[in-house]
Amino acid sequence: MVRKDEDIVCKIRNKVKDVVIKNRLINNNEKFILAVSGGPDSMCLFDIFNFLKEKLKHEFNINFSFCVAHVNHMIREESKKEKIYVENMCNKLNIPFYYREVDVPNISKKLHMSEETCGRKLRYDFLYEIKNKINADKIVIAHNMDDNVETIILNIIRGCGLKGLTGMNYEYKSIIRPLLDIEKKEILEYNIMQDLKPCFDKTNELDIYARNKIRLNLIPILKNEYNSNIMESIIRMKHILELDEDFLNNYTEKIVNNSIIDNNNIVKFDFSVILNEHESIKRRCIRKIVEIKVGSIDGVENIHILDILNLLTNNITRKKYILGNKFTIEIVKKNIAIIY
């Protein structure tokens, strides 16, 4: 007879395995970097990846390797103990360990950022640096279902489009999130059953950050006053909207591909093709063209997209739209523009 603790551990491990296989998050001979803080989420991920290493090899003949990266933000006194804890776990299992200290309090002031935003930026900078250094294939993050719900709610509060309502994906570029189907309460149970003894960040229980306020204040109100299954409802909405987002993305790509005349150092495009479309598709096309040239749409807001559409609609040769040092869009002749 299977004990209850074994049943819980098997259930969670199999859920993660199913996500990994269904979405092809792990392929043969790939190399991964696990972002491990030492908290419950990342220690659950760490333990499950150890399990998957043998499980996938045995069931699917998939071999992979992974290392661990840990960043000390130098905000809390217990950070040094967390580093030792993670490092000891890696040494015990002979897993490569990479570590960096970053003075987030001071750097955030110099960059005029919140500590939360600065810490995230420096953490990802380090992860990508290690990825390039060891030629890894993917970075693995321990975001869970609760994190995804919080992200979606935060996006709604800030005012988002359809993409914001779909939250985080299992895979985005070189980042994978195998725990997105696992609830926080399941992760806490897993840690207990596996006797992982994770570290707990006390600042997660303080409502000093927007995300913490959503988790500690808003979600409990939504559960108690409106819908006890609010988490499941939001995730269900996410999956429905992902289908719409996927269709719109594919349709937009076809329009953009038909509009592009040249795509070397300067992207040259026929915007009459774009202006014939619905307003929603027009905006998506402009974002896509900017992304093709710049690499991302970070810092490009809806007001900028509307200004660019206004420029193209007026269709005056030699008129330009300049967004700081990011890019310039110029109409070179009727219906033809370039972005550089």
Image (tube, rainbow, N blue to C red):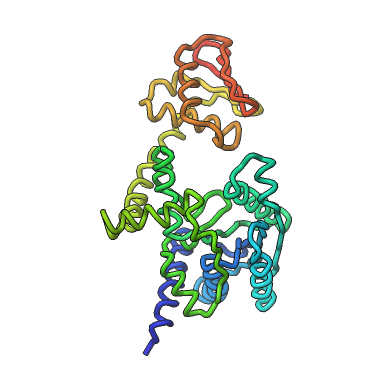
Residue 76, x across and y down, in percent? 63, 61
Task: Give whichever of 25, 161 is nearer the camera.
Answer: 161
Instruction: Look at 70% across and 68% down and name the residue there.
Output: 96
Q: Would residue 259 be seen by someone viewing this image from the given angle?
A: yes
For the C terminus, the image quarter is: top right
Q: Is residue 335 above or below residue 257?
A: above
Q: Would residue 257 be seen by someone viewing this image from the given angle?
A: no
Task: Give whichever of 136, 157 is nearer the camera.
Answer: 157
Task: Give whichever of 284, 274 is nearer the camera.
Answer: 284
Q: Is residue 227 above or below residue 258?
A: below
Q: Is residue 318 above or below residue 20?
A: above
Task: Give whichever of 216, 289 is nearer the camera.
Answer: 216
Q: Residue furthest right?
A: 133
- Does residue 103 appear left or right of residue 175 in this picture? right
Instruction: Look at 52% across and 70% down and name the residue there.
Output: 44
Residue 60, x across and y down, in percent? 51, 71
Instruction: Look at 55% across and 15% down and name the residue there.
Output: 331
For the N terminus, the image quarter is: bottom left
- Does residue 337 appear left or right of residue 2 in this picture? right
Q: How many marks?
A: 0
Residue 173, x across and y down, in percent? 56, 49
Q: Residue furthest bottom?
A: 1
Residue 307, x across and y down, in percent? 49, 21
